[in-house]
């Protein structure tokens, strides 16, 4: 019995729970039945949400209680030339967004960067983290636990790595606050964003800590990870990829493309991104890095909530006699090309546009390249917005393109 | 001439620029042509991206260089009972996400909250901001400009409000750093998220400041706004809606639904969300508020990059003799029910599920209600994840549902 | 019976408690007796500590369990020309410190500033704060309490101001986190630093809140004040005096005094104070403001623990064709010229060196002037250290002068 | 010729500079002459400042342009029982302060702690830092420099350690922001606070980096150290000693000593120190740690400006059936028992009171013990103030003792 309408009746009658529908029908029929329930109870018409372009079953590791899909307009910016440690060549950057003017803005930046010979990019640090918190009796016991951890690190590594075929421990960093001990496990997760791998591996290591020391696990994540919260530890120590990109653009190109001068752009950057952010108590010293990160994340199946960490970026601009120098440094860009949402149909196509779907060779290089291209895209966004401000076009640009 | 293939040829031949396609074809044909260009140049197959369920023209204020849409699986959590200042009743919360286990987790929390009688929610502060930065000669001139601003606030209000039919100025807060003056304009933007309105209105006010004082505008946004960067000023002073939600759940319900005790949940919250976040130098003292914010934002057409500010949340939990008390306080939740991405087809349907599409009566109440429901949803997510940790199911939950 | 030795015997015999000595002898004899006790029990010789230059009674509101005084070497830097809103003229800045090279460094900066015509300084914001935290039943009650506070602000002002002859309320800013309500009271405390006045006045207002609303006071300070902790709220909103100082130094003077160029100093400032501080997750974007603040605080009787807030400073430097522009902006400099330690003998003499002992005419101008001179001194310290780094003399300077 | 009056004449006549006096007279006469100059030019009477109790020559590495000494009242709190990793026994804690009620407050806490059997304390991390910033050509060169640093760490260690007889490198941590490379050198400085040692050693290592790589030194301190600024990097990673202290106090003692309950104290701590600090965007989750740190620093010759980092402390309190558990964790307490101001007469006596003057055996243990005792003292201050608030005595305490 897989008629959506009957199934919906049964849910409304209380015979079935909303989340049990997949037990009684295939994924698409279950979603259809669920749409019906919601439509009947809310008077919403979900026909567009229900008009998704893939088998619902392909989303079963991505969502529960599925009713359909949100469709986010997807544009491309580029070509964007990037000389990275892993990425090399010209890229069209797919950007899914609902913010008018964003793709146009990034595109303008890409155009200038590519005209100037391209951006340089490097992943300078890499590691996904998970930091459980343990309860101990007191600070004396905390010190003992720390000593045990430092002495038996190989055993912890072995326990953690036994749960994963590709993840490797980079380091285990301990922190103590009173009778709480935090161990921040850092992993090389190769082409995966790595959060789930890190969670599972850390659970195994935490079990060993509990077995061998008096420490008792309180939470597998103690917020020193830090996942999806704005935290200085990520801005300082990094999480996911720490990636930097920069470009030199000769003065003539700046003036032609951006209708302003290197000096004016540098002044905007200093007063806004450095001094203004300083005064705001910010961890993000940039103009709109999160815009590019969010749009690229949506287009390529990254975790949208990790835009939070993606906004930990510092932009620098220097006006020189002959050129403009600009850089953007993203401390904690959490990306993957396998796992998570990267396998969903439109998202996989987004990665294909970049030629970065799936595992890299050697492992990790695809995710590195993705980080580098996004960083170069963020640089394009910075240059475009800073120069728009420098030429005072921000408000009018919004009037024309935005809403 | 609107044949996509021919148009694609012309772009590749250099006769047309990628962004000029809409000048030569309707929006869907232009997107098709652009897909062809990208497919030819990257070997990607964009058929699913191109299989979107709406007229491309409807996205023309949301994206440029459109090639199609990213489809993000959308589920529902609920019903969730909310007694808000504006929201009142039971809601299904639409959540678009690629993170397995998230909707299930929030759903479990909703179920417990509703069983306990529902969450209470309130918007306690409201205001969209834009903060231009001006250059002055020195600190003496800075003081003069401040004096002028304080004395002529009505004129600034008039200039700003002349640009908008619905926005109203709440306050103008000045800051000085050396020879830079920042004016943080705060607006009541009613049911709109308000960023563009605030930008345009502030441009008019900034023009007046330039005309009447020696200050010279450097950038219409001086990063004291702060938009899309993690900044203490938003966590402290708020941006968009400052919204709080809480719930009391009797001990029996906690134990039955969450398989743990109020004491254990409270301990996880203290050690993880309060102490762990403190040690991390965080502005987010919560477990996964950003997950719920991101998924609700995607489902209802909010700006995905503003998940950054949405993560500025503090969760508190108290174990009492007879019950668990829990709250979540989101300092800067930037939401709207009109404008931006809210008018896109699937996103509008998402708002319909909540009964909150379009302007509220009185104005502002729909956006208030949306903020309250999201806050209650975030509370559901907090309770569910904290209790999962308290009962140590986190890793195994991921093993089963996620990947 | 006031023989110190006998009193010490009685303390050691358990007949008297250490803190009861003032009940049995005058302040100096009590301190002598206490020294004896400590010397006998620890083998320390406290003869220098006991050789203080004032009547112990004069310190009875400054310390308890007094045994003597710590003597901190005091030097002067200057003359330093300051054109402030309240300060005007040339000043010798008294600096008490144990850090070799500090006074010499500040002195070099003063010399350059004065040679260039002096620093400009302004207090742009002023207000001492105290923020009690109240418990409420839930977020609905929190909203009611906020409404009451907003409606009855005049009554709160009256209650608070009834406790003080000189303090005035500037504003009352409410914040809500779950079932906690914080009210940040801001006072104009004139020439007093104002912490005690603010505490007492706020206690009266808090009593009224408790009497008239369901809110229950949990702590008279809820840490949103924020006193003596590094907190963004102070860096953003200010506490005590928000004071800015700047200077223009012609290129020749820069080169002659600092043996380096405006460009080199600006580069050090950008890379160190702006970019380096950004990366460090800092609230202090300066080189050594705290050094000058600490030394001036010790010399003039300010609260040494408030050096914490005094370090919330942003330094900017710009190299121009003809000159160097430099500024320092101290967000939260908490100073007074009456009350606290300002009446102690050596500290009062320190204020006399500046001509700023006691209340100003009109009230508040002496504390304003003190803030302006310290800001100008901090600017001197910044210029000197930045230029020392620019000319790479830091390490060698420490080798020669320091320890 | 060493008559102060004649020397003062010569300075006023312009024949001598104020800082040249030591070339013409012994240190005391020079100070006397300088006092005369200042007195004549400012109408101040510096007789108490000039009535210091030591040979001025002993201060010649601590101050320049000396005119005398600031005398800060010094009291003692205790006895305070501490079971530390290095400290063991009962201590009188010397506290120099001008804040009335502080010593009494700490003393009350000491008394309760000691009655409860004493505090436990541990140094869990240790290291003084210096982080130079280098300019590189671009991010590609940044990566090369990082690679060189990682490969040649032993050479850097050798260069750095060649400058010091006791300091040892713990680690070298690299950070990149655009074309800026920061290397954070961490040193074990034994019983010295270590800032100067770290500066000199780092200068040597930086020279090697410049010689062997394309990197160019911009500033020996790039603010990632971070010295004397409130910075998350210190709160997270530590600087100087990371020291934790805790205590268990049985319920009866709590009620007797503090006139309140464990529950009330815990509630104040949660709402004020955790939630309030979270809302304030703070790096200090405590009540008054800086008060104790400042007063102990002044009494023992530490650097008063480093109170800034000393305020990076988290206080936790838990109410248990039978007892109160409380802890304080100071992330970055920068202390020494040799060097700096520790050799000054009154300050050395302050260290003698603790039995911790000079180098420890083994080296480092005296500074460790000092950190532990200060941490225990901070814990005493926390307990006392939190319980005063819990019993609502704060305002009245200030009325009686302070002013």
Image: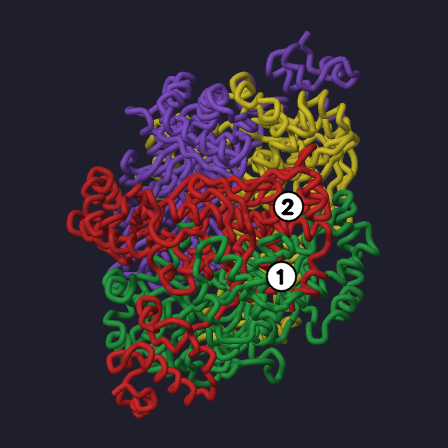
Chain colours: A green, B red, C purple, D yellow
Residue in the image at 60% along x and 81% along y? A359
Residue that protrudes farthest toward the right in the picture: A212
Question: Horizontally, is B331 left or right of C354 in the view?
Answer: right
* Label 2 chain ID: B
Say if mark 2 contacts mark 1, CB within 8 Å.
Answer: no
Q: Is residue B85 above or below residue C104?
A: above
Residue shown at 40% from the left, 85% from the top: B38
Chain for mark 1?
A: B
- Label 2 or label 1, whichever lies nearer to me, is 1
Quick check: D195 above or below A403?
above
Q: Quadrant of the C terminus of chain B?
A: bottom right
Q: Is A189 in front, or is D300?
A: A189
Q: With C349 as the anchor, is D364 left or right in this view?
A: right
Q: Residues within 10 Å of mark 2 (few under 14, many from 20)?
A: many
Q: Which residue is mark 2?
A: B269
Image position of C150 (left or right of A333): left
Name the secondary structure under disc 1: loop
Q: Is residue C359 above or below residue A158?
A: above
- Is B83 or A183 nearer to us in this picture? B83
Earlier sequence position, callout 2 versus callout 1: 1
Query: Residue at label 1?
Result: B101
- Mark 1 closeness class: few <14, some 14–19, many ≥20 residues within 10 Å: many
At 69% from the left and 48% from the top, the residue drawn is B258
Residue D287 makes an appearance in the image:
yes
> Among all residues in the image, which is located at the extreme top?
C1
Q: Position of residue C358 (x, y in %)?
A: 38, 23
Percent x, y of residue C156: 40, 23
C208 vs A328, nearest the viewer: C208
| Callout 2 secondary element | helix
């Amino acid at each position: 019995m897989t008629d959506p309408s009957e199934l919906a009746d049964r849910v409304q009658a209380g015979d079935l729970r909303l989340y049990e529908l997949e037990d009684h029908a295939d994924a698409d029929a279950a979603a259809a039945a669920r749409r019906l329930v919601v439509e009947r109870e809310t008077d919403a018409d979900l026909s567009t949400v229900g008009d998704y372009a893939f088998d619902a079953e392909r989303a079963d590791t991505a969502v529960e209680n599925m009713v359909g899909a949100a469709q986010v307009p997807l544009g491309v910016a580029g070509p964007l030339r990037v000389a990275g440690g892993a990425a090399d060549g010209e890229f069209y950057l797919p950007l899914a967004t609902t913010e008018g003017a964003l793709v146009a803005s990034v595109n303008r930046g890409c155009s200038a960067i590519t005209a100037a010979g391209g951006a340089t990019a490097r992943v300078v640090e890499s590691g996904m983290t998970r930091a459980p918190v343990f309860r101990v009796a007191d600070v004396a016991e905390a010190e003992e636990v720390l000593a045990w951890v430092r002495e038996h690190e190989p055993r912890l590594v072995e326990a953690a790595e036994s749960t994963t075929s590709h993840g490797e421990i980079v380091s285990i960093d301990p922190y103590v606050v009173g009778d709480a001990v935090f161990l921040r496990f850092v992993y090389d997760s190769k082409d995966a964003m790595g959060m789930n791998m890190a969670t599972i591996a850390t659970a195994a290591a935490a079990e060993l800590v509990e077995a061998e020391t008096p420490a008792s696990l309180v939470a597998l994540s103690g917020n020193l990870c830090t996942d999806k919260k704005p935290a200085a530890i990520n801005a300082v120590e990094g999480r996911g990829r720490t990636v930097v990109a920069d470009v030199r653009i000769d003065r003539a190109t700046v003036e032609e493309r951006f209708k302003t001068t290197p000096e004016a752009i540098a002044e905007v950057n200093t007063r806004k991104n450095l001094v203004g952010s300083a005064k705001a108590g910010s961890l993000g010293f940039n103009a709109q890095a999160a815009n590019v990160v969010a749009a690229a994340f949506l287009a390529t199946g990254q975790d949208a909530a990790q835009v939070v960490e993606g906004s930990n970026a510092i932009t620098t601009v220097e006006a020189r006699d002959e050129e403009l120098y600009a850089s953007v440094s993203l401390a904690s860009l959490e990306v993957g090309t396998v796992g998570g949402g990267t396998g969903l149909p439109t998202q996989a196509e987004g990665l294909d546009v970049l030629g970065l779907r799936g595992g890299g060779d050697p492992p990790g290089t695809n995710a590195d390249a993705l980080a580098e291209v996004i960083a170069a895209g963020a640089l394009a966004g910075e240059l475009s917005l800073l120069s728009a401000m420098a030429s005072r076009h921000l408000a009018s640009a919004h009037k024309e393109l935005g809403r």
